[in-house]
Amino acid sequence: MRQNVFLLLSVIFSISASAQISLDEYRSEVLSRSLDVHGAVIESDRAYAESRVERTEFLPELSVDGNFTTAFKREDKADLWGFSVEPRIEQTIYAGGRVRAAYRQSLLRYSMAQQDLEQVKLDVSFAADDAYWSVSAMQLYMAATEEYVNIIRSLYNVVQERYREGYVSHGDLLQVEARLSDAEFSRIAIRKNYDAALHRFNNLRREPDSLAVVLTNSIIDSLAMPVRVALDEIMQCRPDVKVAQQSVDIAEYGVRIEQAKYNPSLSAGVSGSWQTYSPNHSAKTYWDGALVVGLNVPIFYWGERRHAVAAAQRGVELQEIHLEELHEEISLEEADGWSALVSSYSQMQSSLKNVDIASRNLAISTYSYQEGQATLLDVLQAQISWIQIYTNAITARYNYAVAWSAYRRITAQN
């Protein structure tokens, strides 16, 4: 019975709309068209490309240097020109652990970018849910306000007829007329709020702002009360927690990179040259080559290594503090989200009972007034009580739907 009342009001308002869409379809549309999501995807692709760049540090490098020279003055009957081409291949054998640490860092940054993408999707999905529920609520508010105007107009017609017959005073008529004017004013304000909700709804999916919609789902649908998720499970699922944990790992690799700068490094290479003789008497060329082994051993830098490593270790500690703070924030967020969900659910259940009571009270008061057994003030009070309780019921439904979506975001449920 209660569901039918809400459904009737929803249908009354949505008859003129033109585009049907469910919550899942709308969420998918918003995700596929979101610039935030698109930007996060690009950031992830960039991080992947940077990790591939770091990987090339493990591979040998091949380069070629070349030059061509010409002189303005001939010396000793030599040709004025000469050239040389010097190919070189070089391989880093040991860099103190820097190459491996930098590559591990790049892989972690790529993983962080992927987790950032998941976090953006969670936030965009919640924004989509909120916009969807807002339009649903405003449709019901508009339908309720329209019904309220009709109720008062019906009473106004009765009072106006009785005023002509001399049964009620002019003051009673003016009182009902003022109430009707106030209800019509509220209807305009509600319409404005609905337009704003619709504009936001369409803006998120990048459609024309005023495009009308029919919502397949509604805040009057039965959204099952979710089971509370354990905090440890939330920490394992939340993308921002994974990002914070990976930030600690990146900082630890940063310590290794700082240490590697002061470790011995070893490299080997082969180079060659193809060039003309100097001076160039016959334009003949020759080949030459060399095997080069390079060893660098840092010895003394006035304590620079100790201070650089200490600074990097402080960075690790800061990231660990940030991770701990995030755990505390999520714990508080989950507790608040669950409390909001439970309280809004209780309010929703209570408000449905109150709607039945207010509806019966309004019907009885209106009938009694027509039969001369109640005063006009009784009817007006019953009307006010009805619209207040009815809008409270819609608000409770909306609050529960938003709390339901918010808890899904807090617990990282897709």
Image (tube, grey):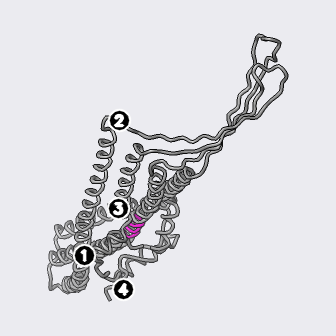
Mark 1 — residue? 344
- Tell whether label 1 touches label 3 (CB within 8 Å): no
Three-letter amino acid code of the residue under disc 2: Tyr
Instruction: Name the residue located 77 percent from the left edge and 10 percent from the top edge.
Output: 73
Q: CA distance from mark 4 to mark 1?
A: 21 Å
Three-letter amino acid code of the residue under disc 3: Gln
Stretch in magenta? 125-133
Residue 35 in picture, x, y percent from top left: 49, 55
Q: CA distance from mark 2 to mark 1?
A: 65 Å
2 or 3: tag closer to the N-terminus: 3
* Mark linked to residue 4: 4
Screen quadrant of the N terminus = bottom left
Q: Is residue 215 something one can see in this rendering?
A: yes
Q: Is residue 164 something one can see in this rendering?
A: no
* The quarter of the displayed image where residue 87 is located: top right
Which element type, helix, strand or loop, lies under badge 3? helix
* The quarter of the displayed image where residue 168 is located: bottom left
